[in-house]
Image (cartoon, grey):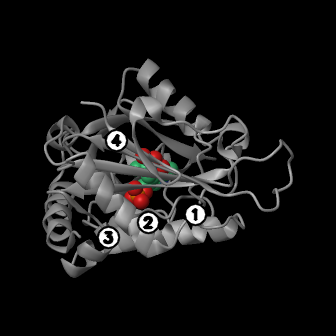
Amino acid sequence: MSRIVYVNGDYVPEAEAKISVFDRGFLMADGVYEVTSVLAGRMIDFAAHMARLRRSLAELEMDAPAGEAELEAIHREMIARNALEEGMIYMQVTRGAADRDFTYPEGAEPSLVLFTQARPLRDTAGARNGIRVITVPDIRWARRDIKTVQLLAPSMCKMAAKTAGVDDAWMQEDGVVTEGTSNNACIVTAEGTVVTRDLSSDILHGITRAAVLRFAREAQVKVEERAFTVEEARAAAEAFVTSASSFVTPVVEIDGTAIGDGTPGPVARRLRDIYIEESLKAAT
Ligand code: PDD
């Protein structure tokens, strides 16, 4: 069954979904995106994704393609038309089509594209076995807090991981971890404290990260938002990543060093369970 894709006002079969070659998303990566996960046909943390979209658009002085109620209605229509039970909804907003120029064009109509990706999110090999990562230099630009579609750097890092025969990469600067290629990086100390990098323009402000830290604090798990080194991570009791597509996924090896006993740790497993349970309760 071909997916139904949303493009600038129309719901069309994916083979018919078209965008201009002059679209600035295509020419200049002048666009932002959000990925919202869907469980049991309902969206997780949709309001938070909308708030981050608003912020990304504001940082780039880009017009919103539609009001938030309309964006929500489009998401719901995409779930219905694609009979999406479990998976993701990808939404991309670009500045639109205009003659190629580095300055922002006046009066361009923003482009809006949505598509769905059906896939199991709860029962995954990563959740069961944990994932193995390598560390790589963070070669991205300095505004990683804006969720732009310029994803070549993380793509290159993910390919380095694939070539090394592992699942993903953690990016580092001067030996200090920034985040995963498409997720936020966390470690757990011997005392059971969850440590993850503090928010700044150095990392994406993950929606899952925020929810997991909230649930951790509610469950009396100590949380420290601060930078940590690759060395500290390799010696940690546990490690895990958070993202809309991976929820909480244990990391069992960093640069060939087993983390803890090399199997998913209890804190990561518990936080994953709490995250899924609470997200299902609050899903819309
Ligand atoms: N990635 N850091 C980076 C660099 C990311 O690309 C992502 C999300 C995250 C986690 O953010 P959130 O919890 O809001 O998903 C952190 C999405 C899932 C993607 O590009 O597919």
Q: Which mark is residue 211?
A: 3
Q: Amino acid at mark 2?
A: Leu
Q: Residue at x 70, y 55 (%)?
A: 142
Marks 2 and 1: CB-CB under 8 Å? yes
Q: Amino acid at mark 4?
A: Ile
Q: Residues within 10 Å of mark 4 (few under 14, many from 20)?
A: many
Secondary structure of residue under mark 4: strand
**Which residue, given by chain and number where applicable, does mark 2 sit on?**
71
Q: Is residue 41 left or right of residue 52?
A: left
Q: Which mark is residue 65?
A: 1
Q: Is residue 198 left or right of residue 89?
A: right
**Which residue, given by chain and number where applicable, does mark 4 sit on?**
4
Q: Is residue 256 above or below residue 58?
A: above
| Residue toward you, 266 or 126 | 126
Marks 4 and 2: CB-CB under 8 Å? no
Secondary structure of residue under mark 1: loop
Q: Is residue 164 left or right of residue 40?
A: right
Please tell me which of labels 3 and 2 falls first in the chain.
2
